[in-house]
Image (cartoon, rainbow, N blue to C red):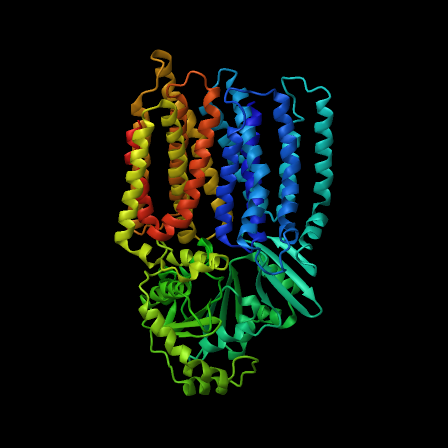
Amino acid sequence: MTLYLLTIGFISILGQVVILRELNVAFYGIELIYILAMGIWLLWSAAGALIGRRAYAPPATVVRYLFILFSLLLPVDVAFIRGARVLFGGIPGSYLPFGLQLAAISIALLPIGILIGLLFQWAAKLYIANERTLALAYAIESAGGLVGGLASTLLLKFGIQNFTIAIICSLVTAGILLLPAREKQGRHRYGFIAAFGIFLVILLLSPGIDHRMTQWTHPNLFESRDSPYSRITIDSREDQLVMFENDAFAFETESAASEELVHLAAVHHDNLKDVLILGGGVEGLLRELSKHSPQSVIYVELNPVLLALAEKHLPEAYKEPLRSKNVTVRTTDPRNYLKSAGLYDLILVGMPEPTSGQSNRFFTREFFAQCSDRLKPGGVLAFRLRSSENIWTQLVTYRNTSIHRSLKSVFQDLIVLPGVTNTIIASNASLSRDPETLIGRFNDKNIETRLVTPEYIHYLYTNDRFFEIANRIASANVPANTDIRPVCYRFSSMIWLSKFIPQMINWDPSFFGRSSANIVSSLLFILGLGALFLLSRRKMHLQRITLAALAGFIGMVLETILILHYQVKSGVLFQNIGILLMVFMAGLAVGSVAVLDSARAHLLTSGSIPKSLGRGLFIGFGILNLIFIGLLKLNYASGLLIISVLLFLAGFFVSGIFAYASLSGVKDQKIVVSPLYAADLLGGCIGSLLGSLLLIPLLGMTQSAAVMLALAVVALILV
């Protein structure tokens, strides 16, 4: 069963990557959906772990057929997700009703999630039947997860399409069953060979199948490519090309939207020589900027796949600036580039909206400080922010104000120009608000435009909305958006939810941003759990379940904080994040084995495991949070090595506590497989949702880690 446990860990992580990426695209790249999907995945896996009698262990052949069922369901699941918007009657380009979105996610994850939980439960029981322990089975499955994380990282790095990765996962699952086994497989082996052959044929046909499935939602599909950051899709009709990123509209070649950002910013500098563009260059920013004849332009693009498709398919008017002698293109993370960049007269930020942890890092105080350091005297920074032209709701006001305050804390002067998309301009010199001066500079350059004209510039600086925006921002009591407290991400998520829950438009979330409210809420949360821990001590089986759930909860929250911190500080390089996930899985594998070895001597002599071991694990968890808080307070530039070590230790303590719970007062290991594994998954589910949606946005990273520290200390009650 060792090989089967390894395989379960492998297909669990690789299959999860495939499904979550598909859901991310199916629902337009909204990170909230991604977080909900992770929580639902863990919930269904916990349900699978609870199916059947606690002591029941099926024949090995049944487990093999569950593997075949998984290999069949995974590509079918991908097809269901690709066609979900069509199946549920969605209008092209629009969201499904929120209830239908949750239904689609739940249906997509139900069979795979339950199957993974059931597979581990039964395989672990068969493994334990040979006088092994649940702790060791958990370690082996975690080691398989490490290999699955490595596979997903490498496959994405080498440009393998997501659907092809799904078929590779199915192929590996079926192929494992062809390896020699102790038990005779008899006629069943022919079925396994047939399944392997079918997936081999599908693998060869996967590019064509992938293209046809994408056409379900993109009838005019030109080309679609997966990248480590997103899925880039290009539709074509006659001479117009439309580019989508994670199926959300990015830009189209007949648009004049790029004129606003470029020209409204450029007229604030009377001698434009050196310009830096951070994202968005291929959508027309470079083309419009060339009309100002700068001496040197550096264009930094995060996603090389997007750049490659743009250079391949965009009209000549868009591609020509990329080949200009005064334009240099760099494919790297914009924040990393700013660390060693030169000085510029103008920095244009064309990065996506701050709707995720990935994009929020380009709208924080720390990012704006980086930009300020790279501006010459009198230099100008400009970016855009989708908003509302006529009415700012409470949520929109708070989102925009949090960014405004971050910007205001760095720059001496800034202007917000009204519109469906706000153009924000900032400088450490005084910015002109006289439309005639700006129009004069615009006319001096004889620029041909379709949208930005002298009349349009005059309108922007003299209409009532221009003055109303300043009043709205001044009246809102909202903290600045920062790296360690990404409040803008929370507001953006709530704005998205308000599309489906209109009552949220009038909510006032500023209460939750107050430190007093945060402290009171955190104390009530910890005291409530402390009371639960005291009740759990009365019965040993409840105590074990609570320990496993708590380990999953603290581990998931801390893992989320550490990865988000790495994203903020070191850039969103998916292969590195994949490495971090693998390190966490390695910690899980080592932690179970280490605790098992430490406890083995005591189990042989006294038949029990010392409570000091459990206390030491929770104290270690608390110290780990304390170390991380210290790094945040010192603003330490935590790189790959530091975060890897912290994640390894987090995984170590999670699996260590799980192993401790599985060994404490347990005579028959089979009866604790279902409840403890389910509790671990449910704890992780709650930690994923609570940490991502509430703790980190509301409290910030430092206070969230402090809550986990306090929780680890209170958990000593359990042991």
Return the residue nearer the eye: 42 or 339: 42
**As drawn, is 45 to the left or to the right of 181?**
left
Residue in view at x 37 percent, y 30 percent: 547
Image position of 185 with respect to 69: above or below: above
Answer with the quarter of the image where residue 451 lies: bottom right
Image quarter in which the C terminus is found: top left
Question: How far across and how far down the image is residue 368, in percent?
Answer: 38, 64
Residue 377 visible in image: no
Name the residue furthest front: 503
Question: How far across and how far down the image is residue 89, in percent?
Answer: 64, 55
Return the residue nearer the eye: 156 or 485: 485
Image position of 685 with respect to 30: above or below: above
Image quarter in which the N terminus is found: top right
Residue 226 visible in image: yes
Question: How far across and how far down the image is residue 285, in percent?
Answer: 53, 71
Question: How far across and how far down the image is residue 495, in percent?
Answer: 45, 60
**As drawn, is 17 to the left or to the right of 188?**
left
Question: How many numbered circles does the render carry?
Answer: 0
Residue in view at x 72 percent, y 29 percent: 193
Image position of 184 with respect to 575: above or below: above
Name the residue furthest top: 605
Answer with the quarter of the image where residue 90 lies: bottom right
Return the residue nearer the eye: 697 or 438: 697
